Image: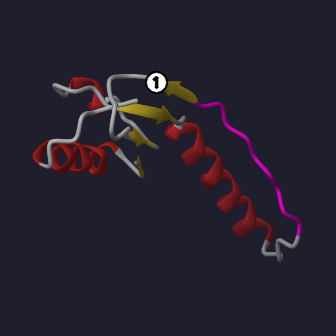
Protein backbone atom coordinates (compact mmCIF):
# COMPACT_ATOMS: atom_id res chain seq x y z
CA UNK A 1 0.00 0.00 0.00
CA UNK A 2 1.47 3.34 -1.06
CA UNK A 3 0.36 6.35 0.99
CA UNK A 4 0.96 10.07 0.50
CA UNK A 5 2.23 10.67 4.05
CA UNK A 6 2.91 9.09 7.43
CA UNK A 7 -0.52 10.00 8.81
CA UNK A 8 -2.25 8.02 6.06
CA UNK A 9 0.23 5.17 6.53
CA UNK A 10 -0.60 5.08 10.24
CA UNK A 11 -4.30 4.77 9.37
CA UNK A 12 -3.61 1.93 6.93
CA UNK A 13 -1.40 0.22 9.50
CA UNK A 14 -4.09 0.48 12.19
CA UNK A 15 -6.81 -0.85 9.85
CA UNK A 16 -4.55 -3.67 8.65
CA UNK A 17 -3.82 -4.72 12.23
CA UNK A 18 -7.54 -4.54 13.10
CA UNK A 19 -8.21 -6.90 10.16
CA UNK A 20 -5.36 -9.15 11.38
CA UNK A 21 -3.12 -8.73 8.32
CA UNK A 22 0.47 -9.78 8.85
CA UNK A 23 2.71 -6.78 8.14
CA UNK A 24 4.81 -6.98 5.92
CA UNK A 25 4.10 -10.61 4.89
CA UNK A 26 0.53 -10.02 3.66
CA UNK A 27 0.59 -6.23 3.25
CA UNK A 28 3.49 -3.83 2.77
CA UNK A 29 3.10 -0.12 3.57
CA UNK A 30 5.23 2.74 2.24
CA UNK A 31 4.78 6.44 3.00
CA UNK A 32 5.84 8.85 0.25
CA UNK A 33 6.63 11.86 2.41
CA UNK A 34 7.81 10.37 5.63
CA UNK A 35 8.71 13.00 8.18
CA UNK A 36 10.36 10.35 10.37
CA UNK A 37 7.15 10.19 12.43
CA UNK A 38 6.82 6.66 11.11
CA UNK A 39 10.05 5.76 12.89
CA UNK A 40 8.45 6.48 16.28
CA UNK A 41 5.64 3.94 16.05
CA UNK A 42 5.50 0.43 17.49
CA UNK A 43 5.65 -0.90 13.92
CA UNK A 44 8.02 1.45 12.12
CA UNK A 45 6.74 2.63 8.71
CA UNK A 46 8.99 2.49 5.65
CA UNK A 47 9.16 5.81 3.84
CA UNK A 48 10.49 7.70 0.87
CA UNK A 49 12.12 10.81 2.35
CA UNK A 50 12.03 13.90 0.14
CA UNK A 51 13.94 17.17 0.69
CA UNK A 52 10.82 19.24 1.44
CA UNK A 53 12.76 22.41 2.29
CA UNK A 54 14.66 22.26 -1.02
CA UNK A 55 11.42 21.67 -2.92
CA UNK A 56 9.73 24.60 -1.17
CA UNK A 57 12.68 26.93 -1.79
CA UNK A 58 12.84 26.04 -5.51
CA UNK A 59 9.07 26.48 -5.85
CA UNK A 60 9.28 29.92 -4.26
CA UNK A 61 12.21 30.89 -6.49
CA UNK A 62 10.29 29.88 -9.62
CA UNK A 63 7.18 31.75 -8.48
CA UNK A 64 9.12 34.94 -7.72
CA UNK A 65 10.88 34.75 -11.10
CA UNK A 66 7.54 34.33 -12.85
CA UNK A 67 6.08 37.36 -11.03
CA UNK A 68 9.14 39.51 -11.76
CA UNK A 69 9.33 38.58 -15.46
CA UNK A 70 5.57 38.89 -16.01
CA UNK A 71 5.86 36.60 -18.96
CA UNK A 72 4.30 33.37 -20.06
CA UNK A 73 6.22 30.28 -19.13
CA UNK A 74 6.01 28.11 -22.20
CA UNK A 75 9.25 26.28 -21.55
CA UNK A 76 9.00 23.24 -19.29
CA UNK A 77 11.77 22.87 -16.73
CA UNK A 78 12.43 19.48 -15.17
CA UNK A 79 13.95 19.64 -11.71
CA UNK A 80 15.31 16.61 -9.89
CA UNK A 81 15.77 16.29 -6.15
CA UNK A 82 17.59 13.54 -4.28
CA UNK A 83 15.45 11.23 -2.17
CA UNK A 84 16.19 8.37 0.17
CA UNK A 85 14.32 5.17 0.83
CA UNK A 86 14.12 4.22 4.50
CA UNK A 87 13.32 0.54 4.80
CA UNK A 88 11.67 -0.20 8.12
CA UNK A 89 9.27 -2.85 9.42
CA UNK A 90 6.38 -2.37 6.98
CA UNK A 91 8.21 -3.50 3.83
Residue ranking furthest to the left: 18
- For disc 1, the marked residue is 86
The answer to which image quadrant residue 17 occupies is top left
Where's residue 82, x and y in %? 65, 31
In this picture the colour scheme is: secondary structure
Q: Majority secondary structure of the magenta segment?
A: loop
Give the residue displayed 40% in from the left and 41% down from the top.
Answer: 31
Give the residue displayed 65% in from the left and 47% down from the top.
Answer: 58
Q: Is residue 35 left or right of residue 86?
A: left
Give the residue displayed 46% in from the left and 43% down from the top.
Answer: 32
Q: Secondary structure at mark 1?
A: strand
Which of the two residues, 65 or 22, is positioned nearer the viewer here?
22
Neighbour tally class for label 1: few under 14, some 14-19, many 20 plus, Cα within 10 Å: some
Which of the two residues, 77 or 60, is positioned nearer the viewer here?
77
- The number of callouts visible is 1
Where's residue 52, x and y in %? 50, 40
The answer to which image quadrant residue 24 occupies is top left
Specify the quadrant that holds the C terminus. Answer: top left
Give the residue displayed 19% in from the left and 28% down from the top.
Answer: 41
Where's residue 81, x and y in %? 67, 37
Answer above or below: position of 6 versus 66: above
Q: Is residue 81 magenta?
A: yes
Q: Which residues are magenta?
A: 75-83
Q: Is residue 34 magenta?
A: no
Where's residue 44, x and y in %? 27, 26
Answer above or below: position of 78 versus 44: below
Amino acid sequence: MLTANDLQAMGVLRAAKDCEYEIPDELKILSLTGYSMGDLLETRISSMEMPLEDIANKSLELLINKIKCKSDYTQVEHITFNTSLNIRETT
